[in-house]
Image: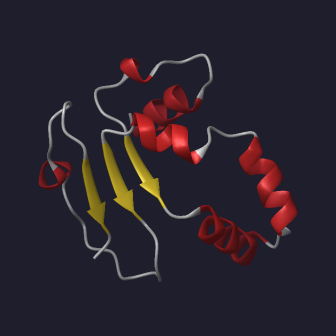
Amino acid sequence: MAWQSFRCFSSAAASPTQVDRVLVVDCPEDEQIRRVVARSGLTPAEVRAIMATQLDRGARLRDADDVLDNSGPPRPSRHRSPSSIGGTNSSRRTVAAQ
């Protein structure tokens, strides 16, 4: 289901109203570029070219119901159930990685 939601929202022809909620995992674009370069071996210019074909950060954040702040260094993950993130469709929550 999450994959279908992502594909639906990332499509230019699709509307975010086709899903119940939109969760955006976000970090600053320079951090995103740094991480992709380190992981993939692509150049910063190649990463920027790929990003230019995607929905821009401002649009993703504007349409998000919830935002997971993924900036900063990697930390060990702790499982959190969707109900622990909470919120209603009319409220927007920003959850910082802990």
- In the drawing, does residue 65 fall left or right of residue 50? left
Looking at the rendering, in which quadrant would you find the C terminus? bottom left
Looking at the rendering, in which quadrant would you find the N terminus? top left
Residue beneath the point at 45% across and 44% down: 61
Q: How is the image coloured?
A: secondary structure
Residue 96 percent across, percent down from the top left: 30, 67
Residue 7 percent across, percent down from the top left: 54, 31
Q: How many marks?
A: 0
Task: Give the camera-side residue of 38 and 54.
Answer: 54
Answer above or below: position of 58 versus 19: below
Q: Quadrant of residue 19?
A: top left
- In the drawing, does residue 85 fall left or right of residue 71? left
Task: Give the camera-side residue of 5 and 35.
Answer: 35
Task: Give the camera-side residue of 85 and 27.
Answer: 27
Residue 3 percent across, percent down from the top left: 47, 38
- In the drawing, does residue 80 fall left or right of residue 25? left
Task: Give the camera-side residue of 51 and 2.
Answer: 51
Q: Quadrant of residue 2?
A: top left
Residue beneath the point at 57% across and 32% down: 10
Residue 97 percent across, percent down from the top left: 32, 71
Residue beneath the point at 85% across and 59% down: 46
Residue beneath the point at 46% across and 71% down: 71
